[in-house]
Image: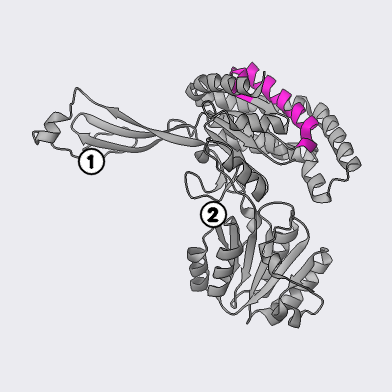
Amino acid sequence: MNVTELARAARAAAGPLSRSSAEVRNAALAAMAAGLRDRAEQIYAANREDLAAAAAEGLDAPLAARLSFDARKLDGLLEGLAALAALPDPVGRLQLRTELAPGLVLERAACPLGVVGVVFESRPDALVQISSLCLKSGNACLLKGGREALRTNRALFAAIRAATAAAGIPADWIALLETREDVSAMLACDRDIDLLVPRGSNAFVRHIQENTRIPVMGHSSGLCHLYVDASADVAMAVRIAVDAKTQAPSTCNSIETLLVHEAAAPAFLPALAAAMAEKGVELRGDAAARAIVPSMNPATDADWDEEYLGLVLSVRVVPSLDEAVAHANAHGSHHTDAIVAEDRAAAERFLAAVDSADVFWNCSTRFADGFRFGLGAEVGISTGKLHARGPVGLEGLTTYKWILRGSGQTVAPFVSGEERFTHRALPLDGGSADA
């Protein structure tokens, strides 16, 4: 089938999937896990072919690390699938219940979006995470991974589709796209696709937004900051900075710029430089930072807007918390920013003032992740302010519908004043207005 046909088939599958029970969808998640285990060796073999092709093409080391799919990654995915199955069913969850008038009850209930199209990077484990979230939330999905992971994605897709179909899920609930032309065709499927989630560069996300009528949700970059306050514990700050930069430097929630209060800089920066040197991190500092650690390379204005996705960190010394906040808001991507501080008042000011989807205190930015948030996994991270924000898990893949149950009411008596609205909040468990 071509992309238009795949989208139509996904739309047809989305209906019965949205009406399926939580038990059916959880059983399908268990079947997905079993299918991945059963086909593990085939998946590993496909991944070895992708890695060999990537090496021959000279793929950068950070991208090659994302591309790898081994037993450790599979074990992590299986753990995530079990955690996802254990989460409450998001479909049909009552969010609000109001008596408009006696015998006239309004409810707001969560429901799936319908069909979700996701374009993601060369990280094959993302295919499993995204598809499992869509399945749990009752959504059909069209998935397009990076070219470098094509063989691995094919093997994962085959395992997932076969396992979930055997568990009673309509087979066309999931489709795998493979080419750039497929992505272009998907952008025209506004009648059948309800949401697009592009994961990639600024330029790529803008291209998607400018070339489709389908709503787009996602983030265009991950330029994250860590601010070390004057009150920070130096050892804690060093530990958090090293983790936030080096634990997985190619990810969107690793830090790219470190902001340091001028009062903390003399004690903190030498300790930071020593720790980062052990990890092979290149530091690029402003004049004030280089005055304390002369071995730093000079930072340029361009560094404050650079998402390195590697072992490079820009460092700026700031005179105040307010200046740190202003820098993060001006140069960041509104993804994740953190403060290290012992002063609670300073920390709360930072958390309130930084305009990002995730703001953290005394912990690594690497916690910005759907699985670590307890969401089961994530389709992506949204830096927008409409619908979902931050890691997009099950809730971000649902919308809601208004359901009004009456007993013959008409509007005319309310307009004339014969009847009056009560607008009384009701318990979500179905209790009466007097409960």
In the displayed image of the protein, which residue is found farthest to the front? 211
Q: Which mark is residue 357?
A: 2
Q: Would you say 361 lies left or right of 177 here?
A: left
- Which quadrant, please, contains the N terminus? top right
Pick the residue in front: 55 or 132.
Answer: 55
Residue 249 point in image, percent of width and height: 74, 55
Pick the residue in front: 286 or 301.
Answer: 301
Magenta region's main secondary structure?
A: helix
- Which quadrant, please, contains the C terminus? top left
Q: Few, some or many C-alpha atoms within 10 Å of disc 2 (few <14, some 14-19, many ≥20)?
A: many
Whether residue 161 appears in magenta in the rendering, the answer is yes
Q: Which amino acid type is marked by label 2?
A: Ala
* CB contact under 8 Å: marks 1 and 2: no
Q: Nearer the viewer, mark 1 or mark 2?
A: 2
Q: Would you say 46 lies left or right of 191 here?
A: right
Whether residue 32 appears in magenta in the rendering, the answer is no
Q: Which amino acid type is marked by label 1?
A: Arg
Marks 1 and 2, Cα distance to the nearest angstrom? 34 Å
Q: Which residue is depicted at the point 55% across and 64% down?
A: 329
User: Can you see residue 339?
Assistant: yes
- The residue that label 1 is drawn on is 424
Task: Write the start and end of the magenta stretch as one range.
Answer: 147-174
